[in-house]
């Protein structure tokens, strides 16, 4: 094993051409690429061991009951040809642009699959960030219930990293580097010493972003394998966001006004990143677009607008519920055009019936 310590995240695309070669690699062939970060994590013991929050305890029990195995509960043998697009071609933001239409049909198919891999790569990197933040929350969460739930979420995130990594390697055969703005957001959450800011950043913002992205993919993907995967992952993410909203609601409101405003400003700045900067341009640049053209097409196009609507329709009500749409930041959110969703349904109202449904593959096996 070779260990390489880097100053920043790698920017190269990793390609996996041969499944046979992958099976023949030994430990000496593996390179571990590490980027070091430091955090002044403030941890706490909890000595009373009382289950004081019934909702959080029930979410924890559901997490135990509906654990799934990425090796056993996903049908990895389901076929889907690479000669077919991974998602509905009509939702391609670049369709109709002269540079895109000038591509051959073979190039358009490569564009589609590489774009799909780029999106899934951000899922993979984001889930690694979620894995590390959840593990931090085990130490720094102040109550017994929250520590138990954070421990179960850590295992959930480990499964998510595993399943997206395997899909990318086996189906797409390449992994794109992390979007720099997603990396900056993860760095902020990981390195901040305040446990409640970690909760806000991960449970409300990053998990909310992930849930919106997974829902979009579940509705548009044609590859049945990725549909299976995101449906399983979404069950976990639904619990995670519900945990964050219900747990933070009372804690945030009990903070001094200055500290509430500090967290509200952080939430606003994170929303700016999610609205304008999480669109990657690297795939389009591979096919002749400039970075500026690619960003304009994605941010300003109908597909990009629809995704942002989907994202903030879910996120803004949650921020309001936990008390982070303060009078100081409301004008800033209004300028983003997202306050129209502040009274939509928030995730504090848990859909227990959905969370308690049997896992899809196990329900199918039971029916047989």
Image (cartoon, rainbow, N blue to C red):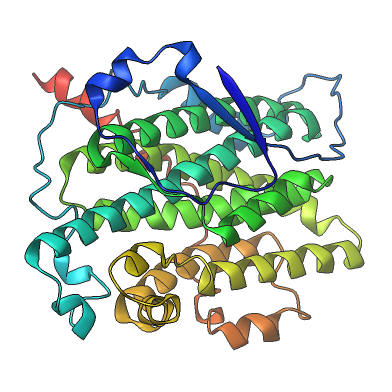
In this rendered view, identify the residue nearer to me: 319 or 94. 94
Q: Residue at x 37, y 53 (%)?
A: 118
Q: Is residue 97 visible?
A: no
Judged left or right of residue 20, residue 315 is right
* Quarter of the figure with residue 290: bottom left
Judged left or right of residue 350, residue 251 is right
Q: Residue at x 53, y 84 (%)?
A: 337
In this rendered view, identify the residue nearer to me: 313 or 72. 72
Q: Please tell me whether residue 121 is drawn above or below residue 98 in the rendered image.
A: above
Q: Residue at x 15, y 66 (%)?
A: 89
In this rendered view, identify the residue nearer to me: 136 or 287. 287
Q: Is residue 133 visible?
A: yes
The N terminus sits in image quarter: top right
The C terminus sits in image quarter: top left
Q: Please tell me whether residue 92 is drawn above or below residue 47 in the rendered image.
A: below
Q: Residue at x 14, y 55 (%)?
A: 85
The spot of residue 92 in percent (x, y) is 23, 69
In this rendered view, identify the residue nearer to me: 342 or 235. 235
The spot of residue 212 in percent (x, y) is 42, 58
Tally of numbered tags? 0
The spot of residue 289 in percent (x, y) is 33, 76
Judged left or right of residue 202, residue 42 is right
* Quarter of the figure with residue 232: top left
The spot of residue 247 in percent (x, y) is 68, 44
Q: Please tell me whether residue 90 is drawn above or below residue 144 in the rendered image.
A: below
């Amino acid at each position: 094993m070779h260990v390489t310590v880097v100053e920043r995240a790698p920017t190269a695309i990793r390609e996996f051409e041969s499944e046979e070669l992958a099976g023949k690699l030994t430990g000496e062939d593996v390179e571990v690429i590490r980027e070091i970060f430091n955090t002044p994590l403030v941890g706490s013991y909890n000595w009373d061991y009382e289950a004081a929050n019934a909702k959080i305890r029930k979410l924890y029990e559901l997490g135990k009951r509906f654990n799934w195995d990425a090796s056993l509960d996903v049908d990895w043998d389901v076929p889907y040809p690479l000669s077919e697009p991974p998602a509905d071609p009509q939702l391609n933001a670049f369709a109709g642009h002269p540079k895109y239409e000038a591509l051959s049909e073979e190039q358009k198919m490569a564009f589609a699959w590489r774009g799909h891999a780029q999106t899934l790569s951000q899922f993979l990197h984001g889930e690694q960030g979620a894995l590390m933040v959840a593990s931090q929350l085990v130490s720094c969460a102040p109550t017994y219930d929250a520590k138990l739930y954070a421990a179960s979420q850590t295992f959930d995130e480990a499964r998510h990293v595993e399943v997206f990594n395997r899909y990318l390697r086996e189906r797409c055969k390449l992994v794109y580097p992390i979007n720099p703005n997603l990396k900056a957001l993860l760095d902020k959450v990981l390195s901040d010493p305040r446990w409640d800011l970690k909760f806000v950043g991960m449970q409300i913002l990053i998990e909310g972003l992930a849930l919106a992205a997974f829902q979009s993919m579940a509705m548009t993907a044609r590859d049945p394998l990725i549909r299976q995967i995101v449906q399983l992952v979404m069950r976990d993410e639904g619990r995670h966001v519900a945990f964050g909203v219900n747990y933070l609601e009372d804690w945030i409101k009990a903070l001094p006004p200055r500290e509430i405003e500090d967290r509200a400003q952080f939430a606003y700045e994170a929303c700016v990143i999610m609205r304008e900067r999480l669109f990657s341009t690297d795939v389009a640049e591979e096919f002749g677009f400039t970075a500026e053209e690619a960003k304009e097409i994605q941010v300003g196009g109908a597909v990009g607008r629809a995704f942002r609507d989907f994202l903030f329709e879910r996120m803004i009500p949650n921020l309001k519920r936990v008390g982070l749409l303060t009078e100081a930041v409301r004008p800033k959110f209004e300028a983003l055009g997202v306050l129209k969703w502040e009274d939509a349904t928030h995730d504090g109202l848990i859909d227990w019936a959905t969370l308690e449904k049997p896992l899809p593959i196990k329900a199918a096996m039971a029916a047989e």
